């Protein structure tokens, strides 16, 4: 007797989308400090929920879903660690991540996301939008880090650019939330409630 496996994608998309919206709104659009709410969401919902979704996709034989969800879940964990460790760096003598290091970090995630975008070409337009807008977000963050690393510009000089990054991140995150809710509602009603 075979049981139908649940669709893990909405869980992963919500974990990614809600955490991205919160980070983009608080830290980038509002220019507020990184706080415990964002780090907690990054560990629990952005990180753990996506890793769980990736494991569920693995059990269904979905390589794309496995790679995407587990990778972005682990991205959130690495992001949280990058922001928590500076408190302990001085104790052990490890240098805090530089803007140059963050530039490469965001660039590599942008490159990974851009390549993964091509895996969405046979999927729905909503998923394509999520991946392309996320690639753009990572590349914008890489550009910001590069400007801080290689020019005399300061965070204050880049305030407008940072707010633009925040708005783009909110759009990206909300597109993932929309897709997740569309998949749940469409499945529950057995028809297209929200088009994807």
Image (cartoon, helix red, strand yellow):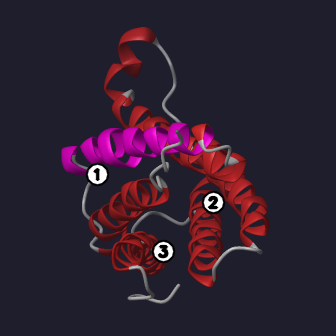
User: Residue 58: x, y in percent?
Assistant: 61, 39
Q: Nearer the viewer, mark 1 or mark 3?
A: 3
Mark closer to the chain start, 3 or 2: 2
Q: Which residue, as the protein is rendered here, is positioned at the far top? A: 92
Tell whether 29 sits left or right of 53: left
Residue at the limit of the structure toward the front, as seen here? 1
Residue 50 belongs to magenta span:
yes
Q: Find numbered disc 1 in the image and state the secondary structure of the residue it sits on.
A: loop
Residue 180: image x %, image y %? 42, 69
Q: CA distance from mark 3 to mark 2?
A: 16 Å
Q: What distance separates the C-alpha of mark 2 from that of mark 1?
A: 18 Å
Q: Please give the label number shown on residue 159.
A: none
Using the image, determine if residue 184 lies above or below residue 12: below
Instruction: Provide the secondary structure element on which disc 3 rests.
Output: helix
User: What's the CA distance linking mark 1 and mark 3?
Assistant: 19 Å
Marking on residue 142: 2
Residue 43, above or below 111: above
Provide the residue designation for mark 1: 34
Q: Which mark is residue 172?
A: 3
Instruction: Give the secondary structure at mark 2.
Output: helix
Q: Find residue 110 and report its image quarter.
A: bottom right
Q: Residues within 10 Å of mark 2 (few under 14, many from 20)?
A: many
On screen, residue 39 versus residue 122, left or right, reads left
Compared to residue 116, the image places residue 195 above or below, namely: below
Q: Is residue 90 left or right of residue 134?
A: left
Q: Residue at x 42, y 61 (%)?
A: 10
On the question of residue 157 being in view, the answer is: no
Give the residue at x 20% y 44%.
36
Range covered by the magenta-colored residues: 36-58
Q: Which of the two labelled residues, at mark 1 and mark 3, occupies the earlier sequence position?
A: 1
């Amino acid at each position: 007797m075979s049981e139908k496996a649940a669709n893990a994608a909405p869980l992963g998309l919500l974990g990614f989308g809600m955490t991205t919206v919160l980070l983009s709104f608080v830290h980038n659009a509002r220019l507020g400090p990184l706080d415990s709410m964002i780090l907690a969401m990054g560990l629990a919902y952005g990180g753990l929920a996506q890793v769980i979704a990736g494991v569920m996709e693995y059990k269904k034989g979905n390589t794309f879903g496995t790679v995407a969800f587990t990778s972005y879940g682990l991205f959130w964990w690495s992001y949280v660690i990058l922001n928590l460790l500076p408190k302990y760096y001085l104790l052990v003598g490890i240098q805090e991540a530089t803007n140059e290091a963050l530039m490469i970090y965001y660039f590599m995630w942008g490159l990974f996301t851009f390549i993964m975008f091509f895996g969405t070409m046979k999927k729905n337009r909503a998923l394509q939008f999520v991946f392309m807008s996320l690639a753009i977000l990572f590349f914008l963050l890489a550009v910001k880090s590069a400007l801080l690393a290689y020019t005399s510009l300061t965070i204050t000089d880049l305030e407008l650019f940072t707010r633009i990054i925040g708005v783009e991140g909110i759009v990206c995150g909300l597109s993932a939330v929309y897709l997740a809710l569309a998949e749940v509602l469409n499945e529950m009603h057995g028809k297209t409630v929200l088009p994807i």
